[in-house]
Amino acid sequence: MAAVALVTGGNRGIGLGITQRLLADGYAVSILATREEPTDVLAELRELAGADDRVRYVRGSVAEPDDHARYVQDAVDAWGRLDVLVNNAGVGPTVRDDILDAGTESFDRVLGINLRGPYFLTQAFARAVLDLRGEPTGTPDRPVATIVNVSSISATTVSTNRGDYCISKAGVAMATQLWAARLAPEGVVVYEVRPGVVATDMTAGVTEKYDALLANGLAPMPRWGKPSDVGGAVAMLVRGDAPYSTGEVFHVDGGMHIARL
């Protein structure tokens, strides 16, 4: 049986790039997303997978704990195992307001989806993994399962017109450390992938701004990132080649995080 990966928001943008790469690498992938089932996208993914039963789609919201349980159980019922969770789904603020003017509605929405949601989905996934594993027989040499949190360069880079987004991603960075420490004795490793400027529908409205910034040296690699760049990083981390590492941050930002003079 193929290894099983859960990818939230895996039907579009960065999430789609991750789904495509994991399917190409032989995983069975279940997607959680709020939109009506995208039959055209799923048909393409099933063709890539070479089998209809290696792709599942669960309609629900990462912000809703009841949907977490339903999503995890659907994968267990279909495939009988859990190997990877990619907490990718996220949103930006509805309006980019100066933090002097920003209100609570956007703050609560962004943190509910970007931080609280993946935090408790990780809890549900980890509990299910440990139930499937049963009583441990010692510390495993290879990961029992892998969790990847997709955050953002905004975890450490300030944008004062979208403070809620920055805070949510900084919270994801801490959540990664918390879960990495808690789950390490159980044989579950946790990583953070931190993308920079990636071409998706979320960034489509600021194309001109980032074109100019990249042209003027925002990152040592003067180009936009692609969803496949993030997909490759996730694939590398979940392969299990670094079994004695957990809590690591892997930047996919063209070197944007490097402090330069």
Image (cartoon, rainbow, N blue to C red):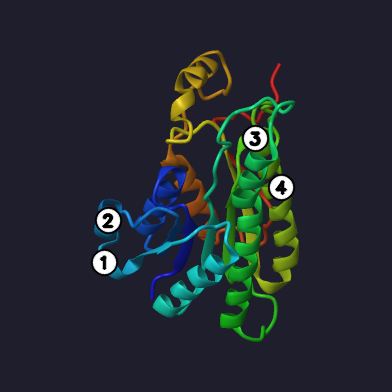
* Numbered badge on residue 171: 4
- Which of labels 3 and 1 is toward the front? 3
Q: Quadrant of residue 117?
A: bottom right
Quarter of the figure that contains the N terminus: bottom left
Distance CA(mark 4)–CA(mark 3) = 11 Å
Mark 3 sits on what residue? 154
Up-down: is 116 above or below 54?
above
Answer yes or no: do the residues labelled 3 and 1 have beta carbons within 8 Å? no
* Numbered badge on residue 39: 2
Crowdedness near tag 3: few (<14), some (14–19) or many (≥20) residues, C-alpha within 10 Å: some
- Which of labels 3 and 2 is toward the front? 2
The amino acid type, in three-letter code, at marker 1 is Ala
The residue sitting at 44% across, 50% down in the picture is 18
- Which of labels 1 and 4 is toward the front? 4
Instruction: Give the SS element for disc 3.
Output: helix
The amino acid type, in three-letter code, at marker 3 is Ser
The residue sitting at 63% across, 74% down in the picture is 127
Up-down: is 149 above or below 196?
below
Distance CA(mark 4)–CA(mark 2) = 34 Å
Quarter of the figure that contains the C terminus: top right
Crowdedness near tag 1: few (<14), some (14–19) or many (≥20) residues, C-alpha within 10 Å: few
The amino acid type, in three-letter code, at marker 4 is Gly
The amino acid type, in three-letter code, at marker 2 is Thr
Q: Quadrant of residue 87?
A: bottom right
Question: Counting residues from the N terminus, which is met first, the one under dot 4 or under dot 3?
Answer: 3
Mark 1 sits on what residue? 51
Question: Counting residues from the N terminus, which is met first, the one under dot 1 or under dot 4?
Answer: 1
Residue 133 locus on image (x, y percent)? 59, 81
Distance CA(mark 3)–CA(mark 2) = 33 Å
